[in-house]
Image (cartoon, rainbow, N blue to C red):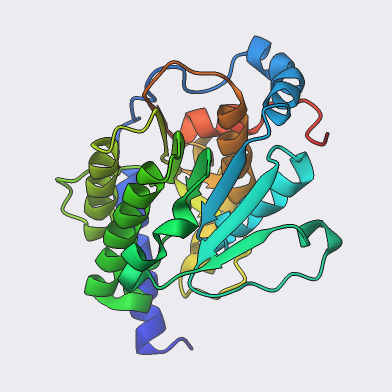
Amino acid sequence: MPGPAAQSAAAAVAALVAALLLLRPEDAGPRAGSSMAEAEALPKLREDFRMQNKSVFILGASGETGRVLLKEILEQGLFSKVTLIGRRKLTFDEEAYKNVNQEVVDFEKLDDYASAFQGHDVGFCCLGTTRRKAGAEGFVRVDRDYVLKSAELAKAGGCKHFNLLSSKGADKSSNFLYLQVKGEVEARVEELKFDRYSIFRPGVLLCDRQESRPGEWMIRKFFGSLPVSWASGHSVPVVTVVRAMLNNAVRPSNEKKELLDNKAIHDLGKADGSLKP
């Protein structure tokens, strides 16, 4: 039988999910989602994007979304240079990862590592922790302070397109700390005025996480038992989020800010087209 800590964590996750289920559909913002014409154009858009020889960095590549994002980036061959920025060096056995650059930084002293953020055209931020793992103060430190400081250094380093993984229901005025912090960091990153700023607000992320988190198995089973049409409104597979991020990155945009809600992520992440070069 689960101990008190596991039961408490499961209750907290369930409360957050309950709050998400009560939310109204979000405004997906301009150009969110994918039309049939755009889906058919994706192979050409990817090829045009590859020809630009852009560089990219990923924050949070040790987490589930960041790990899948790195795998997809390498399989699609979209960038000429791929850099991971994190607190420790990651180990990869596969040949496909041999040219991945890694910058090890101390997030408490990020100003000392400004060079790690220089020279990247595109940035993906999948950085995050949980209140259970880091405590309330630690959660705010990682999900707000580290993310914001990284974005500041990326902007100063020349990053043109910043992609932020946020959450469905993100709102700086929310009574839930998780949603409040997500909403606050969204707004503060926007103030940096990147040439292009894309925010992704997925619902509950469905994945077989390498790191065991009490309560998540129960939540995945819950959404797995629901009708697909209903569950897809409040949850989304990690791989779909990642493909939406990349499909969005390769399509040209004149918008300074793009906000993709859970439905838009589903639509764009499931767009067909040959993924590999």
Percent position of residue 262, x then y = 46, 36
Reply above or below: 213 against 229.
below
Where does the C terminus fall, quadrant-wise? top right
| Relative image position of residue 43 (x, y in whole percent) | 76, 22
Figure disc tally: 0
Q: Residue at x 78, y 45 (%)?
A: 75
Name the residue nearer the viewer: 85 or 173: 85
Q: Could you tell whether 181 is left or right of 102 in the image?
A: left
Pinpoint residue 252: horizontal percent, then vertical percent.
Answer: 55, 18
Q: Can residue 13 be seen? A: yes
In the picture provided, is 232 more to the left or to the right than 11? Answer: right
**Residue at figure coordinates x 31%, y 42% from the top left:** 169
Whether residue 65 sits left or right of residue 12 in the image: it is: right
Vertical position of residue 164 compared to residue 64: above or below: above
Front-most of residues 264 and 219: 264
Closer-to-camera residue (25/89): 89
